[in-house]
């Protein structure tokens, strides 16, 4: 009789241990699923409404290697090209507006040459964060090169895109000046015309960006000679009186 009671107690303890183990495993699985969903959301929807802080969270390697840049958290070039192609098909089908913005951080190579790669690794995430904080949830941001970024603005014409460009320029100029960083942004943007593609708009945006780079270089040379403060001008924006 005593042996039967002892055996029953042992069985009950064993069952309880099994139930506890199952509960712990399920809790761990749910935690991992929530973490994966959070990171997945961070890759595709990192841009948020202007004025809301969005610190960049390190992404797991299995996601950063395929879809997002490990340093900035923005899309990689391959993913950017895929999204641009998808948006191009949508624009051609529904004739909705879209604008591509290309941004180059001028002076980045000089920064690396003088202060090393670590300095660049601190500047680029800050720039990516500024781009993200001033974008919308529907926008797509990518790192296209060492110091080049692309932003796809769906449902946005060129005129409306200037608002985003000016917010980004102002935000980035503030932190560059506060850190005494001798760099500036060159920005180009374009929308597809009635008979052109979004890919052609990407090319046009690059051309505008390169034009602004050359203007910035001439401006920097003039400033060095005259000792005057720099003033940014955005193509398509009102000129100062």
Image (spheres, grey):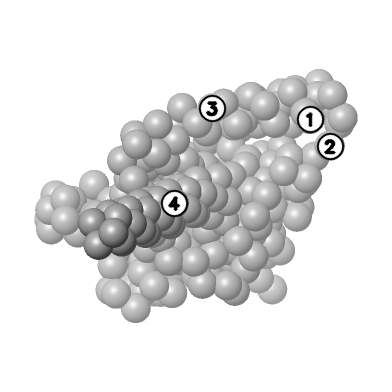
**Which disc is residue 81 wearing?**
3
Name the image quarter holding residue 126: bottom left
Q: CA distance from mark 2 to mark 4?
A: 45 Å
Q: Residue at x 57, y 56 (%)?
A: 47
The answer to which of 210 and 9 lies nearer the viewer is 9
**Which disc is residue 106 wearing?**
none
Q: Position of residue 8 (x, y in %)?
A: 33, 57
**Residue that carries the numbered disc 2 in the rendered image:** 96
For residue 37, side relative to residue 108 (left or right): right
Precedes in sequence: disc 3 or disc 1:
3
Q: Badge 1, how many Cα within 10 Å: few under 14, some, many 20+? A: some
Name the image quarter holding residue 68: top left
Tell me the SS state at disc 4. Answer: helix
> Given contact means CB atoms under 8 Å apart, are the residues at marks 3 and 1 in contact?
no
The nearer-to-camera label among 2 and 4 is: 4
> Given contact means CB atoms under 8 Å apart, are the residues at marks 4 and 3 in contact?
no
For residue 216, side relative to residue 14 (left or right): right
Tell me the SS state at disc 1. Answer: helix
**Which disc is residue 26 wearing?**
4
The nearer-to-camera label among 4 and 1 is: 4
Q: CA distance from mark 4 to mark 3?
A: 39 Å
**Residue that carries the numbered disc 1 in the rendered image:** 91
Q: CA distance from mark 4 to mark 1?
A: 44 Å
């Amino acid at each position: 009789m005593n042996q039967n009671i002892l055996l029953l107690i042992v069985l009950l303890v064993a069952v309880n241990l099994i139930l506890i183990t199952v509960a712990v495993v399920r809790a761990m699985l749910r935690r991992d699923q929530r973490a994966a969903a959070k990171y997945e959301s961070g890759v595709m929807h990192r841009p948020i409404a202007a004025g809301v802080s969005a610190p960049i969270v390190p992404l797991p390697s299995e996601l950063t290697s395929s879809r997002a840049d490990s340093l900035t958290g923005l899309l990689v070039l391959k993913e950017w090209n895929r999204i641009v192609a998808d948006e191009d098909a949508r624009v051609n089908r529904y004739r909705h507006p879209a604008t591509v913005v290309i941004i180059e951080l001028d002076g980045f190579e000089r920064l690396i040459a003088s202060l090393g790669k670590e300095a660049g690794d601190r500047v680029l995430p800050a720039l990516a964060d500024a781009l993200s904080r001033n974008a919308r949830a529907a926008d797509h941001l990518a790192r296209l090169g060492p110091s080049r970024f692309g932003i796809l603005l769906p449902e946005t014409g060129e005129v409306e895109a200037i608002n985003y460009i000016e917010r980004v320029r102002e935000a980035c100029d503030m932190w560059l000046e506060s850190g005494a960083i001798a760099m500036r942004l060159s920005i180009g943007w374009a929308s597809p015309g009635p008979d052109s593609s979004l890919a052609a708009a990407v090319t046009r945006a690059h051309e505008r960006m390169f034009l602004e780079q050359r203007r910035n270089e001439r401006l920097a040379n003039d400033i060095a000679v005259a000792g005057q403060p720099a003033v940014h001008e955005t193509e398509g924006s009102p000129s100062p009186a």
